[in-house]
Amino acid sequence: MSVSNTAANPRDPESGVTAPDTAAKGRSTPELGEPVFDVSGLSVVYGTNRAVRDVDLKVGPQQITAMIGPSGCGKSTVLRTLNRMNDLIPGARVEGKVTYHGEDLYAPEVDPIEVRRRIGMVFQKPNPFPKSIYDNVAYGPRINGMRGNMDEIVEQSLTKAALWDEVKDKLKDNAFALSGGQQQRLCIARTIAVNPEVILMDEPCSALDPIATLKIEDLMYELASEYTIVIVTHNMQQAARVSDRTAFFTASVDEAGDRFGNLVEYDETSTIFSKPSDQRTEDYIAGRFG
Amino acid sequence: MPTEAPEAPQAPEERRRGTLTSGRGRLADPIFKWIVAGCGTLVLIILALMVIRTTSEAWPVFAKEGFFGFLLGDEWTSGGSRTEITGTYGAWPFIYGTLVTAAIAIVIALPLSIMVAVYLTHMAPPRLAKPLSYTVELLAAVPSVIFGLWGLHWFLPNVMRPFFDWLEGVLGWFFLFEGPVLGVGYLPAGIVLAIMILPIMTAIVREVIAVQPLDQQMAAYAMGSTRWEVITKVVLPASFSGIVAAAMLGLGRALGETIAVLMLIGGSQAWGASLFGTGSSMASHIAATFGEATPETRTALMAIGVALFLVTMIVNILARVIVWRLGQTKGDAAV
Ligand SMILES: Nc1ncnc2c1ncn2[C@@H]1O[C@H](COP(=O)(O)OP(=O)(O)O)[C@@H](O)[C@H]1O
Ligand SMILES: [Mg+2]
């Protein structure tokens, strides 16, 4: 665990945090702080299907926010609204408001390309390019015209992603030769290389074995000192282990019989897992922990 | 639950009936293997017989002109003998015509086919993309004589001729575009060849691009790529070997195309650097003169056939070497 020493860092144990310790490796929950994302009244429509309705959520800086809930309840959909990846899905429409540092992400003058450069994303299945390890990491800096020593950028990014020691002697090898867990860390390195402020992760460990999963969790924990992280996971222990705040989503059915996803409860992770205020949250957590 | 169980659960000793050596696999797989191997060998034998037969028939011409004398000589004067070779046979004008028209065709068709394929897969509205793709595939099935007729009677006078006159006016000082513009010639033949091979190349490139994994493209978008960057830096590089395969197929067709070239290349036995000049390709020359050829000339036409086979093979091998070399330097797993 590395915690930087800037006074403003909400992870700093000296910064007057009063919240009780969470299950998350015994560290205390930072205060929410000035929100990075402020989602209010968010609904997402796919064609005619109003798949997610009325979500309100604030994501704090340099902390890990987890989204949990049964499959199909709209976690990925909500995550994609945070960096406008839904724009790429034909027929998808976003209603309500999402602000990023107070700026409306969906204002007509906002360039989604720049949004995605600042708000990176790691996907469920590791998806490196069919290129060398080096070229995978260098891709983002190159297209974004980043100046500086590319070798250095690549090394730094791989180091931050805890992969450098494993690949430093085979940077020219094809990325497909790596194991699944290494590929996922490469994808994280690739995302870091463009210097984003936020990293969104959509079930980043669901295709990995338990050991690779733990490595990614450790990595997330390290990265949270520098980056704001929002992670979708179906693994509740994972949410409990790594996150500061947890949003529990579920699928509901409206009067017309249509299924839709909605946010049930959002709170500090320790609260969600110890004394949730909604019965559905309690049932879900209890059921899973059985 | 079924009321009658036709096969009652067997006792363990029942399940051990028979021997381990009596299964179907011992016979079926070897038979299948032999059938497939036999077919493969048959193809090789037919190919070998064809090569041996044409080469031996053409042998007297190679013997008289010398192998390279035949390939590089540019005089072609038929003799009328039945028993020996009395004329002079140099195939260079036809080899040149073949290479130039095929080169024009591929230079035009390759970028166009990539652009059309990218449009069909990434830009066209879905409602338009389907019918357009079908149309492209349909065009690939149009017989070449139709392209030849259309090229000669409509496309040449109405589109190409005015374009050539303009081109000659602007670039006439450059040796490739030196006048006079005659109408038929290398350039119109090459352009119609390009149009002919465009559909099949587009169909292949489209297919290759369409199967590129979406998750890699999403990853590129998520790093702030524009659509242009996703296509040129992720999709096309990953499609590289497929694009080369399409180019090779198109090139093969262009090299061997007979009838459309015959109608448009001008049919002369000359050769020259200007793309407006007339000439013949190997295939078009064989087709144009085989009917009335003397026995001696037929032998020489056989030799052109052998040369065409060689040229096609060399071009293919070169293309493969290029793919292999580029694949090595790029660390491309797909090659
Ligand atoms: N690309 C899409 N096109 C159309 N509908 C979609 C798409 N992605 C998700 N949906 C709809 O949104 C609902 C929520 O899906 P998703 O956000 O993937 O849920 P989760 O990630 O929680 O499993 C799904 O039930 C589905 O109907
Ligand atoms: Mg999901």
Image (tube, rainbow, N blue to C red):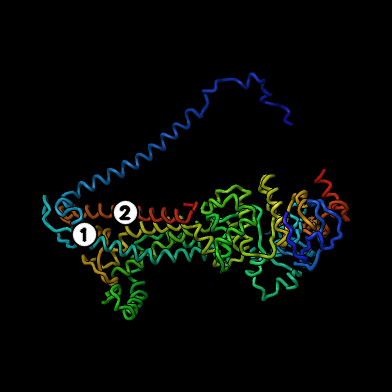
Are the residues at dot 1 and dot 2 in contact (C-beta closer than 8 Å)? Answer: no
Quarter of the rendering containing residue B10: top right
Q: Give SS at disc 1.
A: helix
Relative to B157, does residue A246 appear above or below in the rendering? Answer: above
Point out residue B237 in the picture as x, y percentages from the top left corner.
49, 59
| Residue at 60% over, 53% down | A164
Q: Are marks 1 and 2 on the same chain?
A: yes
Quadrant the C terminus of chain A occupies:
top right
Is residue B122 visible in this depiction of the protein?
no
Name the spot of residue A173 as percent of width and height, x first: 52, 51
* Residue type indicated by callout 2: Ile
Ligand 1 within 8 A of label 2's CB? no
Q: Seen in the image, is B331 located left or right of residue A96?
A: left
**Ligand 1 within 8 A of label 1's CB?**
no
Q: Is residue B281 above or below residue B167?
A: above
Q: Residue at x 75, y 72 (%)?
A: A102
- Left or right for B310, reference B200: left
**Towards the viewer: B217 or B38:** B217
Q: Tell me residue A230's x, y (percent).
A: 73, 59
Q: Which mark is residue B314?
A: 2
Which amino acid lies under the numbered mark 1 shown in the image of this protein? Leu
Task: Give the image location of residue B296, x and y in percent.
Answer: 15, 53
Residue at screen point 78% across, 63% down:
A10
Q: Residue furthest bottom?
A: B169
- C-alpha separation, residue under disc 1 versus residue under disc 2: 16 Å
Quadrant holding the N terminus of chain A: bottom right
> Which residue corresponds to mark 1?
B72
Quadrant of the rendered image containing residue B151: bottom left
- Front one among B59 and A103: A103
Image quadrant in which you'd find residue A29: bottom right
Left or right, B126 with respect to B208, comes to right
